[in-house]
Image (cartoon, helix red, strand yellow):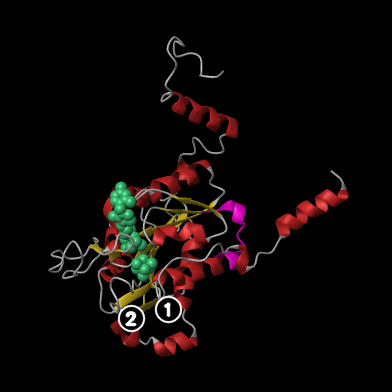
């Protein structure tokens, strides 16, 4: 290799990325939708961590929030409803070197995808999972989701929903091998960024529930919490969040919470007023599945292609007389 080529290569690897290197397209979310704030925080994180776009993968299911990969100039997989987590696990299993992020809605994760969610927690694969919890099915125009508070009026529950809401933090903290659980709200961007950053740095399945505003179908739901900072409980700890002096002045309801204390984390998980924000649980010592079982990692492209072709061949309609042996046109 000549000197010029080597220099070019080195420059490529040392390349510093700017915010626009991660931005793609114009988000189609409604004005005031909390998804915009989550996207801004994630693009900032990618820039600050200088993540290589070609080594970064965003996986989603279906929903407004699941449009997320379209707006990231990285690799992405906009999958099928409820199946973001198994797709992400497959990617991580084959390519543990990639940065894997998952964006999933409350319907996507907690309803149709609930079984995958439970098992993904237990497998504890290294990925950052953001649950965009707007307490409603947004994309399909306002049906109650499992996290809709009791009494929510929607197209499927016009008289108000009958059941108490499922608590995603409490569910996650109840599963074996849980290793990281946090909660953020879209309207405190500084803390949202910090929490997603802590989740990214945790090795394991980092689950962040982000309470996300949907002004289209549930307008003003979180207005009382936004107007009164005392109704937000900030969890602080040297191993969790540390607040800037300015934030500390505004958000005076605080608790010093050790993220290794799972019993207290489970109590905090069900609090709804004040809304807890911070790192509920962070245990760095839970093994990741891709480290204890690594069959299939780094398989060659040729191996994967031959497997895929064998699968597709099962569905090939062979011409009469070909005896199942000769491919048409070959
Ligand atoms: C198998 C399947 N079932 C149902 C649907 C219809 N569907 C699309 S998105 C959605 C719910 C989206 O809600 P959520 O996951 O909370 O995302 P949001 O739009 O609120 O961000 C549903 C039921 C689908 N696309 N596929
Ligand atoms: S419908 Fe709700 S969740 Fe969907 S883009 Fe609009 S505000 Fe966001
Ligand atoms: Mg939703």
Residue 271 position in % (x across, y down): 25, 73
The residue lying furthest to the right in this view is 3
Residue 217 position in % (x across, y down): 29, 70
Crowding around mark 2 (Cα neighbors within 10 Å: few <14, some 14 to 19, many 20+) is many
Residue 236 position in % (x across, y down): 41, 77
Between label 1 and label 2, give the one nearer the viewer.
1
Judge whether 316 appears above or below 205 on screen.
above
User: From which residue to which does the magenta span run?
Assistant: 46-57
Q: Residue at x 48, y 77 (%)?
A: 190
Drawn side of residue 144 relative to residue 306, left or right: left
Residue 52 within the segment the image draws in magenta: yes
Mark 1 or mark 2: name the one nearer the start of the chain. 1
User: Which residue was labeled with disc 1?
Assistant: 188
Of 143 and 223, which appears nearest the observer?
Answer: 143
Rendered-image quadrant of the N terminus: top right
Asked whether disc 1 touches disc 2, contact meaning CB atoms under 8 Å apart, the reply is yes
Of 15 and 315, which appears nearest the observer?
Answer: 315
Crowding around mark 1 (Cα neighbors within 10 Å: few <14, some 14 to 19, many 20+) is few
Q: Quadrant of residue 270?
A: bottom left
Q: Give the quarter the ligand 1 occupies.
A: bottom left
Judge whether 203 appears above or below 216 on screen.
above
Q: Which mark is residue 326?
A: none
User: Which residue was labeled with disc 2?
Assistant: 232
Rendered-image quadrant of the C terminus: top right
Q: Residue at x 77, y 54 (%)?
A: 10
Of 33 and 241, which appears nearest the observer?
Answer: 33
Residue 111 position in % (x across, y down): 27, 54
Q: Secondary structure at mark 2?
A: strand
Drawn side of residue 35 relative to residue 44, left or right: left
Residues at marks 1 and 2, CA–CA distance in whole angstroms: 10 Å
């Amino acid at each position: 290799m000549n000197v010029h080529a080597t220099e070019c290569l080195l420059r490529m690897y040392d390349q510093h990325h700017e915010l626009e290197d991660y931005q793609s397209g114009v988000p189609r979310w409604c004005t005031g939708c909390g998804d915009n704030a989550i996207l801004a925080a994630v693009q900032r994180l990618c820039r600050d961590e200088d993540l290589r776009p070609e080594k970064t993968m965003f996986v989603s299911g279906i929903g407004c929030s699941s449009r997320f990969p379209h707006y990231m100039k990285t690799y992405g997989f906009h999958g099928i409803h409820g199946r973001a987590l198994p797709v992400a696990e497959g990617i991580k299993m084959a390519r543990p070197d990639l940065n894997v992020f998952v964006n999933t809605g409350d319907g996507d994760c907690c309803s149709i995808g609930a079984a995958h969610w439970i098992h993904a927690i237990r497998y504890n694969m290294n990925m950052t999972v953001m649950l965009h919890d707007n307490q409603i099915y947004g994309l399909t125009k306002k049906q109650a989701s499992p996290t809709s508070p009791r009494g929510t009026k929607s197209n499927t529950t016009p008289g108000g929903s009958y059941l108490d809401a499922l608590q995603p933090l409490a569910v996650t903290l109840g599963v074996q091998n849980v290793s990281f659980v946090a909660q953020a709200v879209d309207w405190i961007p500084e803390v949202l960024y910090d929490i997603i950053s802590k989740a990214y740095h945790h090795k394991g399945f980092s689950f962040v529930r982000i309470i996300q505003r949907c002004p289209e179908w549930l307008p003003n739901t979180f207005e009382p919490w936004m107007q009164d900072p005392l109704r937000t409980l900030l969890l602080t700890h040297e191993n969790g969040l540390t607040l800037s002096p300015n934030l500390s002045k505004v958000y005076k309801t605080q608790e010093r919470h050790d993220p290794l204390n799972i019993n207290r984390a489970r109590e905090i998980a069900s609090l709804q007023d004040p809304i807890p924000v911070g790192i509920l649980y962070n245990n760095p010592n839970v093994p990741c599945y891709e480290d204890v079982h690594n069959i299939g990692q780094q398989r060659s492209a040729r191996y994967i292609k031959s497997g895929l072709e064998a699968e597709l061949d099962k569905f090939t309609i062979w011409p009469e007389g070909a005896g199942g042996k000769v491919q048409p046109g070959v």
